[in-house]
Amino acid sequence: MRLFSLARLPFSLLASSVILASSALPVESSETELLVLTPDNFDATIADGVWFIEHFSPYCGHCRRFAPTWKQLVEETEAKPDPGIHLAQVNCAVHGDLCNKNKVDGYPQMNLYRNGQFVEKYNQARTIELLTEYLNAHAEPRNPPAPAVTTTAVAEVPTPTAVEKDEALEEAKPREDMNPHGLVLSLDENTFQANVDKGGIFVKFFAPWCGHCKKLAPTWTQLAGEMRKKLNIAEVNCEEHSALCRQEGVTGYPMLLYYGGRGTKTEYTGGRRLEQLKAFSEKVSGPGVQELKFGDLNNRAAEQSVFYLLLHSPSDKAVYNQVVDASHILFGSPPLYTSTANAFYDHYNSLVYYDTDQFGEPIKLTAASLFSAINGAAQGTIPYKHSENVVERLARYLNQKLVSLESFVVNNPWHTAFYALVVLGLFGLLIRRLLADTEPSREGGYLRKEGRLD
């Protein structure tokens, strides 16, 4: 009966029904593979890092219209070397219970999660610009914000002259007081160069009509207050000073550049939340060199995959000041530590070292000399030296054993006394045995001479 009833329906109605049903089916993209989560893998997947999840239904018209934007957002995010955020979807038509658990009350709904915990629901317009800005603001790159550093000049530590060596013996002078009032400096053609030449200044290039600039303005003012007496915070109005902005290579608004002095310039492309901007500012304004205590060595090694350690004599101010001066372009990444503790020399006494480059010249604090020495050491073309000779290493080994024995005696007096008595007892038994073996034997109360026949 059902087949007969369908056969009697008009062909146009049947065709319309087939087309409508086809349009309602979900369409899979063959170009970009979108990550779709299920109840089986949802919790485990979002447990680590920041996740932006779209909850959708393939039968929702808004979802279908939003699909190309979501695809573009995924492509642009995955194209970044260190996006700091992951994107995925949940099909609520298939996994309604999961969407109910995630408190989805409409489609499409996008939720932000951090390390498995719900953070917030996205409530802005679903445009690619606003979504990209939202992701950048909440992303947490593994190495922020160093990947986008563009250094226009590299400071090479010159070989000091006789006069400079005498001057280098003085302590490194502290920087001029930074940002004394916690206010944003407004720079123009007359004041810009003098301020950036001093270094330690974070500059925002903006245009008054730019929406992103307007949104950043109150945050930038807050940043200046947070960095009072730490870092200069400034801005340049590119509408009024367009020539200056072109000179500095400004290609969009807002553009944030950090000037570290010595002609170095670094573009900041991390998130624009206050805490992210403050983290970067604290990093570049902090000391380029930190003192490292021997007891903190293991902790620093666990925290940092790479760091530099300069061991120097307390009286060798020239080398110390040169390293401090050259370290500002590192922005603390990787960290640079210094120490004069003898414990480091004791700890690394068995290491080998190199004190000449590939040309046989003593290593200097210049790029040419350092890279020549590193290449020579890696290729085995430079002979290495031991930190101590054989006699010194043997004496140090014996001294360490004696120190260990002394420590045991002090900490375990009763054990030590017991072991001493045992040793003395064994020694007494050994002496008695030796004396017994050499005493003449007696027979019938008379001494018998050995080896005689008469």
Image (tube, rainbow, N blue to C red):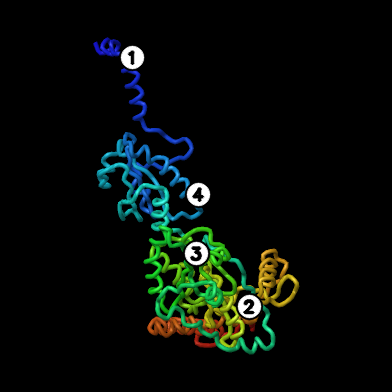
Q: Which residue is mark 2?
A: 387
Q: Secondary structure at mark 1?
A: helix
Q: Is 218 placed above or below 362 here? A: above
Alpha carbons under labels 3 and 1: distance apart: 66 Å
Upstream in sequence: badge 2 or badge 4: 4
Looking at the image, is mark 3 or mark 4 nearer the viewer? 3
Q: Secondary structure at mark 4?
A: loop
- Does the rendering let one see residue 8? yes
**Residue 440 x/y as whole percent:** 56, 85
Q: Which residue is mark 1?
A: 11
What amino acid type should be assigned to the residue bearing mark 2? Ser
Nearer to the camera, 447 or 361: 361
Alpha carbons under labels 1 and 4: distance apart: 49 Å
Q: Secondary structure at mark 3?
A: loop
Q: From the viewer's perspective, tell me whether residue 196 is left or right of residue 142.
A: right
What amino acid type should be assigned to the residue bearing mark 4? Ala
Residue name at image x 33 percent, y 40 percent: 56
Alpha carbons under labels 3 and 4: distance apart: 30 Å
What amino acid type should be assigned to the residue bearing mark 1? Phe
Mark 4 neighbour density, 10 Å: few (under 14) some (14–19) many (20 or more)? few
Upstream in sequence: badge 2 or badge 1: 1
Q: Is 91 placed above or below 452 here? A: above
- In the rendered image, which quarter contains the N terminus? top left
Q: Which residue is mark 3?
A: 238
Upstream in sequence: badge 2 or badge 3: 3
Alpha carbons under labels 2 and 4: distance apart: 48 Å
Looking at the image, is mark 2 or mark 4 nearer the viewer? 4
Q: Secondary structure at mark 2?
A: loop
Q: From the viewer's perspective, tell me whether residue 159 is left or right of residue 266.
A: right
What amino acid type should be assigned to the residue bearing mark 3? Cys
> Which label sits on residue 79?
4
